[in-house]
Amino acid sequence: MSLTAIGAGIAALACIGAGIGIGMATAHAVDAIARQPEADNKIMRILLLGSALAEATAIYGFVLGILIIFML
């Protein structure tokens, strides 16, 4: 049972990485908009696409952790 918990914990690290990545991307997007306000539409579009991809990675890690807990 302890190896199952370790595996689920490792799978949950994807959620932490995605949270840090989205936070850093948002900070850099705000900085970029502050430097170049006329490019805000392009920056926001790219930010939303990147955040969606990072969040999908977090969801995959979460689902994998749940599967490890309940299937093993």
Image (tube, rainbow, N blue to C red):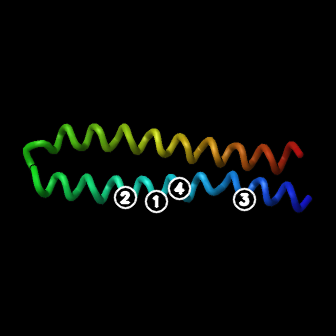
Measured from the top left, where is residue 65 in percent x and y?
A: 73, 49
Within 10 Å of disc 1 (Cα), the crowding (few <14, some 14-19, many 20+) is few
Three-letter amino acid code at disc 4? Answer: Gly
- Return the mark for residue 24: 2
Question: Label 2's element?
Answer: helix
Check contact, mark 2 vs mark 3: CB within 8 A: no
Task: State the residue position of label 1.
Answer: 20
Q: Which numbered disc flags the more N-terminal residue, 2 or 3?
A: 3
Three-letter amino acid code at disc 1? Answer: Ile
Task: State the residue position of label 3.
Answer: 9
- Return the mark for residue 46: none
Check contact, mark 4 vs mark 2: CB within 8 A: no
Task: State the residue position of label 4.
Answer: 17
Q: CA distance from mark 2 to mark 3?
A: 23 Å
Measured from the top left, where is residue 64 in percent x and y?
A: 71, 44
Measured from the top left, where is residue 27 in percent x and y?
A: 30, 59
Question: Label 3's element?
Answer: helix
Residue at image x 38%, y 41%?
50
Check contact, mark 1 vs mark 4: CB within 8 A: yes
Residue at image x 22%, y 43%?
43
Check contact, mark 1 vs mark 2: CB within 8 A: yes
Q: CA distance from mark 4 to mark 3?
A: 13 Å
Three-letter amino acid code at disc 3? Answer: Gly
